[in-house]
Image (tube, helix red, strand yellow):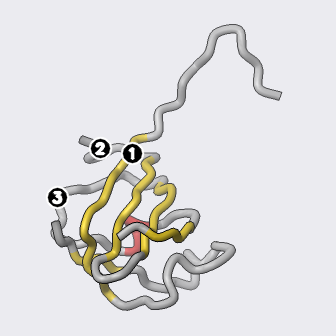
């Protein structure tokens, strides 16, 4: 549904753990791949506990390490139990000024 859309929020449940990782991805979502890479998860990081296997990879890249804290404590590949992708849509509100 979000294939090809830019500006998405991705939330994934890591298999075998209580981890949920996710955040904002400014790049186009590509659901045709059998694996996720760190470019799919270039995001502001948040980690909380939630508990279709797809292989995931969160690598540490010197260019992409602009986060307050890492998304995960390891850069190993991991499988996910489930994921959700949400498209961000800017909404124009008539006669509304943001200050």
Where 61 sits versus 5, above or below?
below
Q: Quadrant of residue 68?
A: bottom right
Q: Quadrant of the C terminus?
A: top right
Q: Which numbered tag is attached to residue 2?
A: 2
Q: Quadrant of residue 10?
A: bottom left
Q: Is residue 30 left or right of residue 59?
A: left
Q: Is residue 97 left or right of residue 89?
A: right
Where 94 sits versus 23, above or below?
above
Q: Nearer the viewer, residue 24 or 51?
A: 51
- The residue that mark 3 highlights is 32
Q: Secondary structure at mark 3?
A: loop
Q: Is residue 72 left or right of residue 39?
A: right
Q: Which numbered tag is attached to residue 86?
A: 1
Percent of width and height locating residue 74: 46, 91
Mark 1 to mark 3 CA distance (whole Å): 17 Å
**Marks 1 & 2, CB-CB < 8 Å contact:** yes
Residue depicted at 71% across the width and 8% down the height: 95
- Which residue in the rendered view is the most extreme toward the right? 99
Residue depicted at 36% across the width and 52% down the height: 28
Q: Is residue 7 left or right of residue 15?
A: right
């Amino acid at each position: 549904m979000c294939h090809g859309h830019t500006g998405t929020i991705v939330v994934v449940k890591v298999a075998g753990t209580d981890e949920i990782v996710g955040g904002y991805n400014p790049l186009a979502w590509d659901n045709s791949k059998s694996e996720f890479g760190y470019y799919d998860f270039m995001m502001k990081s948040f980690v909380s506990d939630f508990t279709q296997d797809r292989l995931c990879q969160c690598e540490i890249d010197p260019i992409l390490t602009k986060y307050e804290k890492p998304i995960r404590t390891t850069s190993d590949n991991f499988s996910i139990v489930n994921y959700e992708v949400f498209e961000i849509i800017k909404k124009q509100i008539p006669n509304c000024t943001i200050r």
